[in-house]
Amino acid sequence: MKKDNTKKTSVMNAPYRKNFLIQKKTRFLITCKFMLQPLHPTILAIESSCDETSASVIRGGKVLNNVIASQAVHHKHGGVVPELASRAHQQNILRVVNEAMASAGIKNSDLNAVAFTRGPGLLGSLLVGVSFAKGMALALGLPLIEINHMEAHVLAHFIDEPHPSFPFLCLTVSGGHTQILVVHDYLDMRVIGETHDDAVGEAFDKAAKMMGLPYPGGPLIDQYAAAGNLKAFSFSPTVMPGLDFSFSGIKTAFLYFLRDRKKENPDFVEQNLHDICASLQHHLVQMLLQKLTLAARQTGIHQVAIAGGVAANSGLRQALQQTAVARGWQIFVPEFQYCTDNAAMIGMAAHFKFLQAKFTGLDAAPVANLVVGA
Ligand code: ADP
Ligand code: MG
């Protein structure tokens, strides 16, 4: 076949061509700017969504520290008091940020970005972290990175080795949330099941309060359960469709259980504390694992991670380990300090966002019910 050597002439008219060249130049400049961003950014991350004021410095994806100031002011109230939480954040934040910068040996001029938790969480608490981050970014001329707290809990798995590979399932269990997510990529995850009412951490804490234990009661139930019989008492199962959860029913059932037993024996709780804690913990853990097993079966994903404060629970860790052996799962459990609220996970999430140049404007406001993927 004869080769067509005729020169191709542009079919673009002049104004269109001019516009095309301007767009090309703009794209080139944006690409250059992005390429000039360091691949090993130093980021200050701030977390203030609930009752922990935390700051962390992360450099090139490596967490340098994780400073956390917990708020003891809530203990005597048996739960987090939002107004007291935001006041305590205001008192703590400067000290916590200064400590994180100093212990990492970082000067303001070393920073490439400031990251903050935008939500979900208590509005007044979030506002303190958001405002502080904005003030710093404005004063230092740095870009801001907003982080979804729930996505950060999942990305805490990339702080230490071994890392899960994509896709993996993550059960995120905390005082405010209970979710099962499919994680497709660092910044691409989807909730496939969640609680319709209370979180499992709340069920732990409220049950502990009913037994007269101080806040937060979750870790105490875990401690007492270690020496108890998990089959001593049983509670009726809560039936929920699909991969969703409900924990309000067990709270009420537990209240009536204690009331009825105390009628027969006023010292019932004191005399049976270990067995009650072990039985309740077993019941809650089974509720979680039943849905997690269903999620693994439905998605065919066998890499399973847990995250959030309740991921510290030894009953959950043990049952997960047993299920993993029985079903051939590979499981991932973060170090304890990265389970409960912490800024290191915010920094880890910010690192991935920085690499994709996902920055936020100074007009970003906190969102109390921010959803995953928003
Ligand atoms: P939130 O983000 O909702 O503030 P966190 O991720 O900080 O929650 O987790 C706090 C929750 O984790 C509390 O409800 C606490 O009781 C629970 N928790 C922490 N450690 C344990 C444990 N060992 N066993 C059960 N629950 C625990
Ligand atoms: Mg949390």
Image: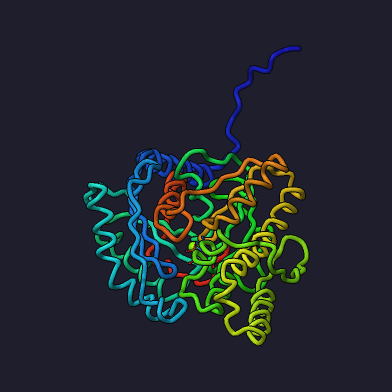
Is residue 113 in view?
no
Instruction: Please state which of residues 365 and 191 is positioned toward the viewer in this rendering.
Output: 191
Image coords of residue 246 (percent x, y): 68, 70
Instruction: Please state which of residues 364 and 94 is positioned toward the viewer in this rendering.
Output: 94
Image coords of residue 308 (percent x, y): 52, 58
295 sits left or right of 126 in the view:
right
Q: Residue at x 68, y 42 (%)?
A: 302
Q: Residue at x 61, y 67 (%)?
A: 275
Image coords of residue 354 (percent x, y): 42, 48
Is residue 166 in view?
yes
373 sits left or right of 134 in the view:
right
Instruction: Please state which of residues 2 and 274 is positioned toward the viewer in this rendering.
Output: 274
Q: Residue 197, located in which quarter of the rendered image?
A: bottom right
**Extreme residue toward the bottom, this view:** 263
Q: Residue at x 24, y 50 (%)?
A: 103
Image coords of residue 74 (percent x, y): 40, 77
